[in-house]
Image: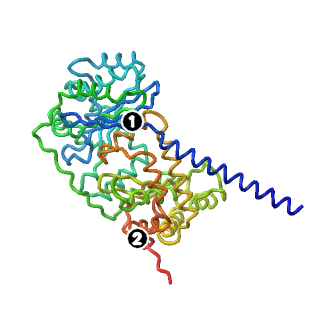
Amino acid sequence: MLKVATTLRLVSKQGNNVRALATAAAYKQALVNVPPTQLTVLDNGIRVASEDSGAATATVGLWIDAGSRYENSKNNGVAHFLEHMAFKGTSKRSQTDLELLVENMGAHLNAYTSREQTVFYAKCLAGDVPAAIEILADIIQNSSLAEPEIERERGVILREMQDVESNLQEVVFDHLHATAFQGTPLGQTILGPTKNIKKISKADLQQYIKTHYQPSRIVLSGAGGIEHSKLVDLAGKHLGGLKNTALDVPELAPCRYTGSEIRVRDDSMPLAHIAIAVEGAGWTDADNIPLMVANTLIGAWDRSQGGGTNNASFLARAASCENLCHSFQSFNTCYKDTGLWGIYFVSEPMQIEDMLFNIQREWMKLCTTVTEGEVDRAKNLLKTNMLLQLDGTTPVCEDIGRQILCYNRRIPIHELDARIDSVSVQNVRDVCYKYLFDRCPAVAAVGPTEALPDYTRIRAGMYWLRV
């Protein structure tokens, strides 16, 4: 009986190994079979990039190298203001005509502004791509910027600012940027201060367009049922007339990181919202992949997930079993030449110190004693998240546009997969030691923060002295 049982176990183990190998082979094959991203540069410098998946729908968009980082203290908020004005009518069609045209197509038209980019995109049926391109081109070239609409939108943005102030996670991250990159453009908010919004004029908007909306700074991205050659023809037809102006775009000055803190104490609030971070790596830095693995290893958790002692992440186990917080999420925010790597958590006042102690202990373990099993788990989870985030034409289109602006190419999924696979335990330890160990953190806290240790104690937790 013992021999039979042993034989059965061996057969079962061999069967599992065969299935694992077959799954791995199918996964590698699937990565290679992803449609290629094609890139063409028009005569005026506009880059046209697309991935043709043959889908029934498509997403096309304009990614512009312009955001709040390119503003100064006087015009901070103008990039976001322009995004709002984009859908308020052009010299060719009124706001009503624009809305009816989009609705009759059954399309979805949207835009957003970040610290380094402004984006306008449309999701539609594959057959409606020519109309969508014409609308997007009209919006960025012929916006009417009528004075009554500017005044109306001024009020809309001020109300949006009030909404943002009620989103405490947004508030904390704005404070975190303000303290970490104090005195630099990255420390500014995307929406801008109220005093700026109240006085931004049509001339300010026009000047920003002339300076930043130049063909050399624009990427037309497409994903879904799109033929690249047709997209290039449409781009030449509707965007080929754009010319680079003589106005010089201000050079992107390095944004100095400063270890520091901001605390906004309000004991009337039930929970404290806290973020702690160190300076991370830029998009093109080789350290970014190991930092992404480390970020995934710390992970995220909230009370709705449960899990208790069955959570793979030690921090999630501690948070759930010891009731240290309501939620936490690790983040790796990248910019062209710098970034912020850290964690955001929401906690009851008397649990803040214990939660912070556990966070810093996990950070020090990343630098010194992280294990191969933990790194392998994080790598697998990172690859899974990478594929899940590219599920649909809109996220693929966004991925193409952002990567062309950041790298001037799109990194193929199989290459990114190989780069994640190549990260070793020693890589993670070395990179985390470089960015985390004995570094000055940036801290932002809002709410009942009395129990948050003072900055010198937080700073002292950024290294271990062990014999």
Whether tag 2 and tag 1 are in contact, CB under 8 A, the answer is no
Type of amino acid under label 1: Cys
Sequence-wise first label, 2 or 1: 1
| Nearest to the observer: residue 154 or residue 341 | 341
Q: Is residue 330 above or below residue 122?
A: below
Image mark for residue 151 = none
Q: Is residue 217 above or below residue 420?
A: above
| Nearest to the observer: residue 252 or residue 159 | 252
Q: Residue furthest bottom?
A: 467
Residue with the mark numbered 2: 459
Side of 54 where 308 appears, left or right: right
| Nearest to the observer: residue 331 or residue 291 | 291
| Nearest to the observer: residue 230 or residue 241 | 230
Note whether residue 80 is visible.
Answer: no
Residue appearing at x 39%, y 57% in the figure = 288
Provide the secondary structure element on which disc 1 rests.
Answer: helix
Q: Which picture quadrant has residue 180?
A: bottom left
Q: Is residue 199 above or below residue 108?
A: below
Type of amino acid under label 2: Arg
Q: Residue furthest left?
A: 246
Residue 20 x/y as whole percent: 64, 51
Q: Which picture quadrant has residue 348?
A: bottom right
Closer to the observer: label 2 or label 1? 1
Residue with the mark numbered 1: 397
Residue appearing at x 34%, y 42% in the figure = 402
